[in-house]
Amino acid sequence: MVSNPVLAVWMLGPDFSYEQALIARGVVTIAGTDEVGRGPLAGPVVAAAVILDPSNIPEGLNDSKKISAKKRDVLFDVIRSCARFCVAEASVEEIDELNIYHASHLAMCRAVEGLGAVDHVLVDGNKIPREMVPPATAIVKGDGKSQSIAAASILAKVTRDRHMDALAQQYPGYGWDKNAGYPTKGHISALIELGVTPHHRRSFKPVHNILCHL
């Protein structure tokens, strides 16, 4: 038995309370949005936006980082079968041009826009993207608090991981099928030995430093 109510909430995972509070105020269409891929040295940043059906919420939704790859794959298909969703990205070129912060916001805005009419957006993080058109609420660690954001985090992560798996076949040696482009020791070593690919973010320091020494 858990006596600490804060710990109890954490153990239970996200719920639908943020969405229910908006519904009680007369808000009808509520989307959750999240992005994946701020930290990697390679690949796009991917965002998803999801509108859940309050009468058909998939079981087991949580922050995508807290569930196994196998469970994410199952939930990926379940979410897509019972919710409105859109997945979008900002490219490596856009990341280098805008910086990763603004590129992440761009991807989230694209995902929300792709849904069509939305009355309110629940955004993972502490900032609402400036370009976000519908009214929005920022929720820190929202993927662990809101089921709509959790669903978006799962769609975004599975999509990006599969994209990096495909790129790993085209560019063997960097380990993208295992590290998803993050700066692991093996990835850094491959960068030094094999060089920079078109899918590397040139504005990120490890990649930039290698290019400067060419």
Image: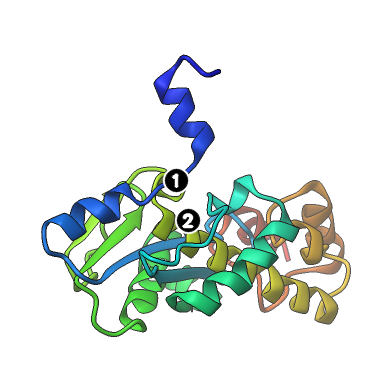
Residue reaching furthest to the top = 3
Kind of residue indicated by mark 1: Pro
Q: Position of residue 112 (x, y in %)?
A: 33, 75
Task: State which tag comes first along the sequence, 2 or 1.
Answer: 1
- What residue appears at the point 56 percent right and 62 percent down from the top-left corner? 154
Asked whether residue 53 appears in the rendered view, the answer is yes
> In the visual, does 31 lie left or right of 1?
left
Kind of residue indicated by mark 2: Ala
Residue nearest the observer in this picture, 204 or 140: 140
Residue nearest the observer in this picture, 200 or 127: 127
Asked whether residue 43 appears in the rendered view, the answer is no
| Element marked by disc 1 | loop
Q: Position of residue 80 (x, y in %)?
A: 54, 77
Q: Which residue is mark 1?
A: 14
Asked if labels 1 and 2 touch by Cβ distance under 8 angstroms, the answer is yes
- What residue appears at the point 80 percent right and 59 percent down from the top-left corner? 178
- What residue appears at the point 85 percent right and 68 percent down from the top-left corner? 194
| Element marked by disc 2 | helix
Whole-angstrom CA distance, mark 2 to mark 1, is 7 Å
Q: Is residue 187 above or below residue 6?
A: below
Which quarter of the image is occupied by the C terminus?
bottom right
- Dividing the picture into quadrants, the one containing residue 92 is bottom right
Q: How is the image coloured?
A: rainbow
- What residue appears at the point 61 percent right and 60 percent down from the top-left corner? 208
Q: Which residue is mark 2?
A: 150
- Dividing the picture into quadrants, the one containing residue 101 is bottom left
Residue reaching furthest to the front = 55
Mark 1 residue crowding within 10 angstroms, few (<14) / some (14–19) / many (20+): many
